[in-house]
Amino acid sequence: MEQLNIRYLCQTIGNLSGLPVRLYESGKQALFCSVIRFSHDPMTPYQREIFQIGEHVGYFVTPRFLYYGVLNAGSARIVIGPTAQVLPGEASLRELAFQADVPREETEAFLDSVKALTLMPLESLLTMLCALNHALTGEELELSDVAIHEYEQQRLKLRLEQRRMERQYNEASSALPHNTMQVEETLLSIVRSGDTAALRQWFAQAPPVRGGVLAADQLRQLKNTFIVTATLVSRAAMQGGLSPEDALTMSDGFIRQAELLSSQPAILDLQYGMVLEYTEQVERIRHGTKPTRLALEVANYVQHHLSEPISTEAMAREFYMSRTHFSARFKKETGETLTGFILREKIEEAKRLLRYTDKSSAAIGAYLGYSSQGHFSRVFKQYTGKTPMEYRDGLA
């Protein structure tokens, strides 16, 4: 089919769906059409993984459950998206802007563009691609023919910040079904406390268990078990202090992803990643063995606003207190000043980004709301004893 016809199809699909559509010819971008104006392409952080997809129809799910549909037809590659069934939260979208190298002054416009995207189930996006594939190649594909890809597992490892340990347990002990009460409570207690070290040790030594029968066939049994596990660990994470909105959004995203999987190893791998993700999220907001309600609420607030300048005045208004009373109460309950806590959390996030991304020190400082690279470097050295670059060089 002539390139002009492919362009016409891409433009029509883009206009009808309200999603960005990209056409690549022989690896080079020939067309980008979108009814929504984007100053920067949100696909940029994931282009390498998306280009690795070789099937006629495939898809890619980002760390925060945005997804892209991919169609390969001869020398042409069409990429549609992103979209989602439920749009990620503000903090996740700001992280996407950072990953896409959007300058600070353009971030708000970029976020508005992403929020204007048409939302749809992944199945609908794939059905659209199957129809487009048929028009271009004559091939008739069903959704059942569009399988999960190995790159999804690699993507999962990146989403978990490349900290997943090598599995030290066999297939039987890696499953997390409806267990005996003792085993179940041990796991949920670990999630509630945000103890990732204990979780890794528990997985390495987890006893083989046999879950109850939840379905007639093995694949449905695994998926139903996954749903039960997601429900239990999300509730445990909320008990540990994770905000209900974050916990339930993560649960919905993981369950939707599990429903698309078609093999036992992939489901078990995602299940382990889900439990570790919840535990890590709880670990990041808990300080001390028994944090107060205020401490947990402040930690959640800071985690959602790490990419912004955070003022004690704004936080005090959020919690309906005067600035003086708010700061004094936080200091009394935690033994730490509010300003010190905010700075420490930003530096911890900076350390994570220096370790797991290739973003420059200047980009990381700007993302975290510092007024200049010099200011960021001074604060970072004050808390770590090293400049950002010295810290990154020491990781090698």
Image (tube, rainbow, N blue to C red):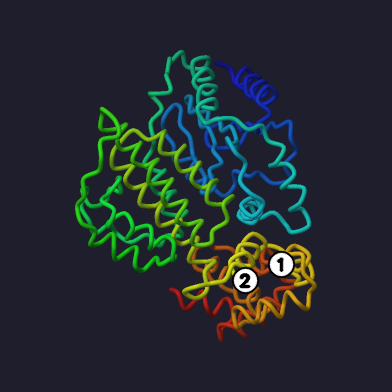
Q: Which mark is residue 346?
A: 2
Instruction: Establish if 1 lies above or below 198.
Output: above
- Regarding mark 1 in the picture, which secondary structure is present there? loop
Tell me the kind of residue under disc 1.
Gly
How many residues crowd around disc 2 within 10 Å: few (fewer than 14), some, or many (20 or more)?
many
Q: Amino acid at mark 2?
A: Lys
> Mark 1 — residue?
369
Front residue of 139 and 186: 186
Say whether disc 2 or disc 1 marks the residue closer to the N-terminus.
2
Residue 184 picture location, percent across and down? 31, 54
Residue depicted at 69% across the width and 46% down the height: 40
Q: Is residue 326 left or right of residue 393?
A: right
Q: Position of residue 105 (x, y in %)?
A: 78, 57
- Please, which residue is most extreme toward the front here? 181
The image position of residue 260, as x and y in percent, is 41, 33
The secondary structure type at the circle numbered 2 is helix
| Contact flag, marks 2 and 1 (Cβ < 8 Å) | yes
Q: Is residue 293 left or right of residue 185?
A: right
Q: Is residue 159 left or right of residue 85?
A: left
Picture residue at 38% right of the left edge, 24% below the top: 145
Camera-side residue of 276 and 347: 276
Q: Give the residue displayed 49% in from the left and 59% down from the top.
A: 239
